[in-house]
Amino acid sequence: MIPIGFQTVVYLMYTAVFIVSLVGNGLVCYVVMSSTHMQSATNMFIVNMAVGDLVMTLFCVPFPFVASFLLQYWPLENYLCQTFTFGKIVAVMVSAYTLVAISVNRYIAIMWPLKQRTRKHQAKYIIAIVWTMSIITSFPFLLATSLDQRYEIYFCSDKWPSEYFRRLFNAALFILQCCIPFAVLLFTNIHIGIVVWGKLPPGEAQNSRDIKMAKSIRKMIKMMTTVVIAFIVCWLPYDILLVLRAYGMSLRAWSNQPYVWFAFHWLAISHTCYNPLIYFCMNTRYRAGFVSAFRNMPGFGYVLTRRDEDELPVTGRLRAPSEVFV
């Protein structure tokens, strides 16, 4: 039996993730798509990650995991069991592959500055490839997932032809979701850091435009590095636990099992909240876009406008919404 206090904590924490993720990722999509100045290739990739996080939020929070976790059985139909599992894996793979696409795109732009940069329409093709690869990668789990009846109740679980296939596909998922993306991200970010933060050759000077551009690139690299670290920290413990279970580690006899699964699963799902917060804290354009979006909301707009008027000098003026993206 799971204590009532712990059940309450589960509800509150998953509800918080659900609300913050919907609002934050919705704002990211709105800010980029409502301003032509924000629709660069990198920002299109960021929107794609936000869409993936929204899919994750809707497929995993609040009902599917909370219901099965607290009720200890699956109360829905078989096709919903398959859909929720498939959608969750697709969304995670979209985030991983999109991070790789962003990193490779920045790597090419910095290592070969004279090469033509990725255009918006090219970014759309790359995004289509990301979703296609994510669906193909996740498809075996769609086929293997089904309801499993035990003691007159049903559980949503995976059924593989043999234990060999279970281990093979779980290991492959771990490699594709974590190992390969992490290796690519580590390689590209280290080389980018060496180029951007490396010292200039003796006698070489920089003009103000070069200094400003280098500063902007460094800010972008710091922001995307933080996004990568958040992804790895949130998902790696849960993925390792899944691999260990696939290779025979059982937690059913452990009295603390519900708390361990809750902690690792919540940490993984909570990743859907962090990217918008990172953009808000580390990017002035996203921060200005978020404020502009809230200003257009009933109630929020009046409060923010009054606060800005109080902080501005008499000769100051409020910036027009179009100016914050220049």
Image (cartoon, helix red, strand yellow):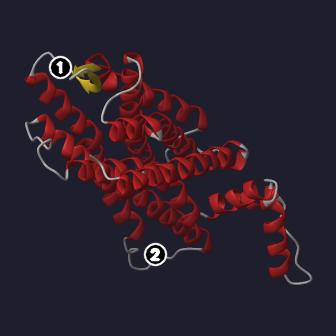
- Mark closer to the chain start, 2 or 1: 1
Q: Residue 112 — which label?
A: none
Badge 1 density bin: few <14, some 14–19, many ≥20, Cα 10 Å: some
**Label 2's element?**
loop
Question: Considering depth in this image, is 60 or 42 the residue closer to the camera?
Answer: 60
State the residue at coordinates (42%, 35%). 91
Can you say whether 186 is above or below 316 in the image? above
State the residue at coordinates (34%, 53%). 234
Quarter of image, res 312? bottom right
| 137 to the left or right of 241 | right
State the residue at coordinates (48%, 66%). 218
| Residue 231 visible | no
Q: Amino acid at mark 2?
A: Glu
Q: Position of residue 85 (x, y in %)?
A: 36, 28
Residue occupied by mark 2 = 204
Q: Position of residue 292 (x, y in %)?
A: 75, 58
Question: Considering depth in this image, is 12 or 199 the residue closer to the camera?
Answer: 12
Question: Considering depth in this image, is 206 or 262 the residue closer to the camera?
Answer: 262
Can you say whether 242 is above or below 134 in the image? below
Residue occupied by mark 1 = 160
